Image (cartoon, rainbow, N blue to C red):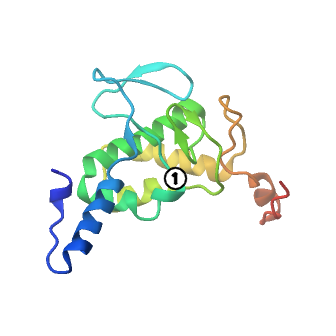
Amino acid sequence: NGMLGRIRIDGGEERDRRTFATMLYHALLAPNVFSDANGDWIGMDGVVRRADGWVPHANFSGWDVYRSEIALLSILDPGRAGDMMQSLVENARTSGWLPKWPVAAGQTDVMVGDPASPMLASAFAFGARGFDAHAALDAMVKGATETGRSPNADYVERQGLDDYLRLGWVAQDES
């Protein structure tokens, strides 16, 4: 209710205001907290760590949130959005690469594209702080200029990057 109350709606039909409130509620469900009450959380390398000064989040539906939800959350609750972005930074630290669609402590390697970079950039642009922006930038640059696989789930951040770096373009996916 506290988060829903941060936006005031005037005018329109009652059903439209109810629909808006319902959609806002859905936008606030995930990414969700991924730590115990004492701050313990599991990194993508399987190691349990303790968060100090931030709240770990998981389950980023990358393609579904990078365009507008992360910007909205950064405006409504920049502290929470900063925690979410720190979670992406920690995903990169513990797996070697920014995720596309992480679930719990693992890379799912579903979908194409690179939604973590625009999530980090838009969160910062819309007011989220409280995350290591320098480490975020380093992870974004690494994902755009280096190839490799994570040790967990054999994850590749940007398929086709070898060809892109070598040729300047990527052939159509043959899979």
- Considering every residue shown, the one lying at the far front of the view is 15
Q: Where, by quadrant of the figure, is residue 33 drawn?
A: top left
Residue at (54% x, 38% y) in the render:
92
Residue at (37% x, 41% y) in the render:
32
Question: Crowdedness of circle 1 by 10 Å Cα count: few (<14), some, many (20+)?
Answer: many
- Considering every residue shown, the one lying at the far bottom of the view is 12
Element on which disc 1 rests: helix
Q: Where, by quadrant of the figure, is residue 15 drawn?
A: bottom left
Q: Where, by quadrant of the figure, is residue 19 drawn?
A: bottom left
- Considering every residue shown, the one lying at the far right of the view is 174
Amino acid type, callout 1: Gly
For the question of whether residue 118 can be seen, the reply is no
Which residue lies under the disc numbered 1? 62
Count the marks: 1
Left or right of residue 148, residue 14 in this image: left
Q: Where is residue 91 in the image (x, y as percent from the top left)?
A: 51, 36
Q: Where is residue 128 in the image (x, y as percent from the top left)?
A: 31, 53
Residue at (50% x, 50% y) in the render:
61
Q: Where is residue 17 in the image (x, y as percent from the top left)?
A: 22, 71
Left or right of residue 111, residue 169 in this image: right
Residue at (15% x, 50% y) in the render:
2
The quadrant in which the C terminus is found is bottom right
Question: Of residues 6 and 123, which is closer to you in this image?
Answer: 6
Question: Of residues 50 and 124, which is closer to you in this image?
Answer: 50
For the question of whether residue 121 can be seen, the reply is yes
In this view, 89 is above or below 44 = below
Question: Of residues 172 and 165, which is closer to you in this image?
Answer: 172
